[in-house]
Amino acid sequence: MSVVSTSEPDEGFLASEHITGLLERLRREPTLRAWVLTAPTGALATLGVVLDDNELVQLLEKIEELDERALPVTAADIMTPDPLTLTPETSVHEAAQILSDHRISGAPVVGDDGCIVGIVSEYDLIARTGSTVRDVMTRDVVTVPDNATLDRVRAILVTQRLKRVPVTAESRLVGLISRADMVRELAYRWQCKRCGNLVRARRPPNGCPRCGASNMFEEAPPLPAVAACPTCGKPLDR
Ligand SMILES: [Zn+2]
């Protein structure tokens, strides 16, 4: 029996523990991913990664692939999966360290059964007094199911003035959607001028996958108004 390596010899560094760990972290943290793609040299130096030019190009291609997907439809399509979580017993100091180190502005608090018991934001950490997350967390947490439409998620973020909303499946936490995630969807939407096809991409694609037109993509049209109840302000289903 012989063992055949399937990876190109010069792509070996991508399989190193350091890089696979970094890619896994980037998969979970779209904000960090956007930062690395915007200012790669500085960002990677901060993350302790030093690469030659050839390796840098290969790594950036891998990172861009993490953003490639079909036009999102549901909360599950745009959420950060497996978000960092805190437990009620986490100390306030450790919670502050976690938010600071990962450049995130809030994290869900999860009990032993995987269900959300609260959420901690930067505001909670600086506004409230206590030694553990249980003491300072916000207990009334608005969540969305993983099959909620993007319109619904957007309406909840807007009408409830939330900065982030946890995503659940069978009442267990499966992801987190922040305002930044919604803003990214706006930035990544392009429309074919010829056939109206909407696509998701970092830059306008060259060819339209539906009608085949070349260089016909323009900025996607503005979003429709948020549908909220004029009396209670709660988002309306659409
Ligand atoms: Zn088209």
Image (cartoon, rainbow, N blue to C red):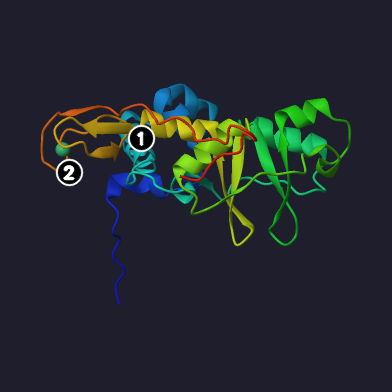
Query: What residue is shown with label 1?
Result: 60
Of tags 1 and 2, which is closer to the observer? 2
Q: Quadrant of residue 230?
A: top right
Distance from Cα at disc 1 to Cα at disc 2: 24 Å
In the depicted view, which residue is nearer to us: 65 or 217? 217
Query: What residue is shown with label 2?
Result: 209
Residue 124: x and y in percent read 77, 31
Question: The C terminus is located in which quarter?
Answer: top left
Query: Could one spot residue 50 in this view of the protein?
Result: no
Q: Dividing the image into four quarters, tell me where ligand 1 lies.
A: top left
Residue 121: x and y in percent read 71, 33
Residue 73: x and y in percent read 39, 47
Residue drawn at x 53%, y 42% as measured from the top left: 236
Query: Could one spot residue 141 in this view of the protein?
Result: yes
Considering the numbered disc 2 on the image, is that residue within a helix, a strand or a loop?
A: loop
Residue flagged by tag 1: what amino acid is it? Leu
Considering the numbered disc 1 on the image, is that residue within a helix, a strand or a loop?
A: helix
Residue flagged by tag 2: what amino acid is it? Pro
Q: Could you classify mark 2 by the number of other residues whose Cα lies within 10 Å: few (under 14), some (14-19), or many (20 or more)?
A: few
Which dot marks residue 32?
none
Q: Is residue 211 left or right of residue 115?
A: left
